[in-house]
C-alpha cells in the first residue's frame, strides 16, 4: 500500500474568518504536506485546503533539498490553490505566499524579511523561509497549485540559549529564525493565521490583470535580488549578470551584458562585488 493510501490522522482547525482557508489539517507528523495536498487536489479537493505539520519526514525545498527542523518549532505548511493563471504566470502563486509570509512576520515578530528570487525569505544574508510550489491534479480536473512554505519560527535558536543544542555548523552561518531576530518566542500556529489572513486578498487579486501587476510590483519592491550581481544555475547552463527586474509574471530579468535574459526557473546565488 502506498503512503498516499494510508489514512493519516490530523487535527482539524479553522482558518481566519472570511477567507477561503476554512479548514487547516494539522498533523503531528507526515512525510510531506505538499505530497498530501497534491493527493487531495487529484481527488478534487477545493481551493483553500491547508495542511500543516509539527514534523515532516520528507519535507523538501527546491531541487529536492531537504528541509529539517526539530518537531513543533517551525511553521511547515502547504496551501491548495486553483488559480486562473496561464502556465507562464504560475510563479505568482509563489510570490503571493512569500509576500503574505513576510507581512505575517512583520505583524507577529516585527521582523521585516526581504525576498530572494525565486522562493526565499531572507534577513540580511540568512534564510528565514523557503517556498516550494508544485502543480497538482489529474487529467480533466481543474488545475491546481500546491504552495508549501517552511518558516523558521523557533529554530535555529539564538546563540548560547540555555537548553538548546548547538546549531549544525553547515546551517549556522546561513539560517535564522523569528526567535533569533526578535529575541522572543513565537507560536507557528499564530503565524499561520496571520499568513492566511494576508494571503486571502492576494489570491483574489490574481483573478485580474491589474491585481496580478500589483502583486508582481510589490514583490519587486521587496526583492533583494533586483540590483544584485547574481549567478543563476539552469539545467546545463550557468548565467551570470545583474538582476535587472521582475516581470509582471514573476520571472527574473538578468542583464548579461549583451541582452536581458528572462529566467523562469533557476537556482540563484547572490554574488559579492567583484565575484
Image (tube, helix red, strand yellow):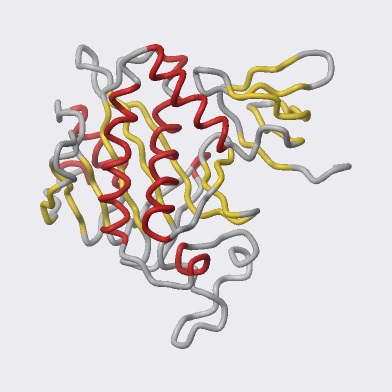
Q: Is residue 177 left or right of residue 8?
A: right
Identify the residue at horizontal 56%, vertical 60% (top origin). Answer: 175
Identify the residue at horizontal 22%, vertical 42% (top origin). Answer: 50
Q: Is residue 56 above or below residue 219?
A: below
Identify the residue at horizontal 18%, vertical 33% (top origin). Answer: 20
Quadrant, the N terminus = top left
Which percent across, then down, holds residue 124? 63, 54
Q: Is residue 100 left or right of residue 223?
A: left
Image quadrant assignment for residue 57 = bottom left
Return the residue nearer the eye: 156 or 182: 182
Which percent across, then down, holds residue 119? 51, 39
Q: Is residue 205 left or right of residue 219?
A: left
Residue with the most extreme bottom position? 162
Which percent across, then down, holds residue 149? 39, 45
Quadrant, the C terminus = top right
Identify the residue at horizontal 51%, vertical 52% (top origin). Answer: 112
Which percent across, then down, holds residue 152? 44, 59
Image quadrant assignment for residue 207 = top left
Return the residue nearer the eye: 192 or 25: 192
Q: Is residue 110 above or below residue 193?
A: below
Q: Is residue 21 above or below residue 171?
A: above
Amino acid at each position: 500500500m502506498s503512503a498516499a493510501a494510508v489514512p493519516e490522522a490530523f487535527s482539524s482547525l479553522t482558518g481566519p474568518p472570511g477567507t477561503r482557508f476554512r479548514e487547516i489539517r494539522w498533523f503531528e507528523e507526515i512525510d510531506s504536506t505538499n505530497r498530501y495536498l497534491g493527493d487531495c487536489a487529484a481527488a478534487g479537493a477545493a481551493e483553500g485546503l491547508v495542511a500543516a505539520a509539527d514534523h515532516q519526514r520528507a519535507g523538501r525545498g527546491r531541487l529536492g533539498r531537504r528541509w529539517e527542523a526539530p518537531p513543533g518549532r517551525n511553521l511547515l505548511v502547504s496551501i491548495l490553490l486553483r488559480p486562473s493563471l496561464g502556465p507562464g504566470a504560475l510563479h505568482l502563486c509563489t510570490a503571493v505566499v512569500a509576500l503574505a509570509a513576510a507581512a505575517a512576520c512583520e505583524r507577529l515578530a516585527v521582523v521585516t524579511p526581504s525576498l530572494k528570487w525565486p522562493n526565499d525569505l531572507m534577513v540580511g544574508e540568512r534564510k528565514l523561509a523557503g517556498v516550494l510550489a508544485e502543480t497538482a491534479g489529474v487529467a480533466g480536473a481543474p488545475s491546481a497549485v500546491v504552495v508549501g512554505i517552511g518558516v523558521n519560527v523557533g529554530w535555529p535558536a539564538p546563540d548560547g540559549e540555555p537548553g538548546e543544542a548547538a546549531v549544525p555548523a553547515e546551517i549556522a552561518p546561513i539560517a535564522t529564525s523569528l526567535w533569533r531576530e526578535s529575541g522572543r518566542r513565537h507560536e507557528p500556529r499564530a503565524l499561520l493565521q496571520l499568513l492566511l489572513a494576508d494571503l486571502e486578498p492576494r489570491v483574489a487579486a490574481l483573478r485580474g490583470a491589474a491585481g496580478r501587476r500589483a502583486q508582481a510590483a510589490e514583490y519587486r519592491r521587496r526583492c533583494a535580488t533586483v540590483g544584485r550581481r547574481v549567478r543563476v544555475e539552469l539545467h546545463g547552463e550557468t548565467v551570470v549578470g545583474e538582476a535587472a527586474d521582475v516581470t509582471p509574471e514573476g520571472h527574473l530579468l538578468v542583464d548579461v551584458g549583451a541582452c536581458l535574459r528572462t529566467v523562469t526557473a533557476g537556482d540563484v546565488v547572490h554574488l559579492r562585488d567583484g565575484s
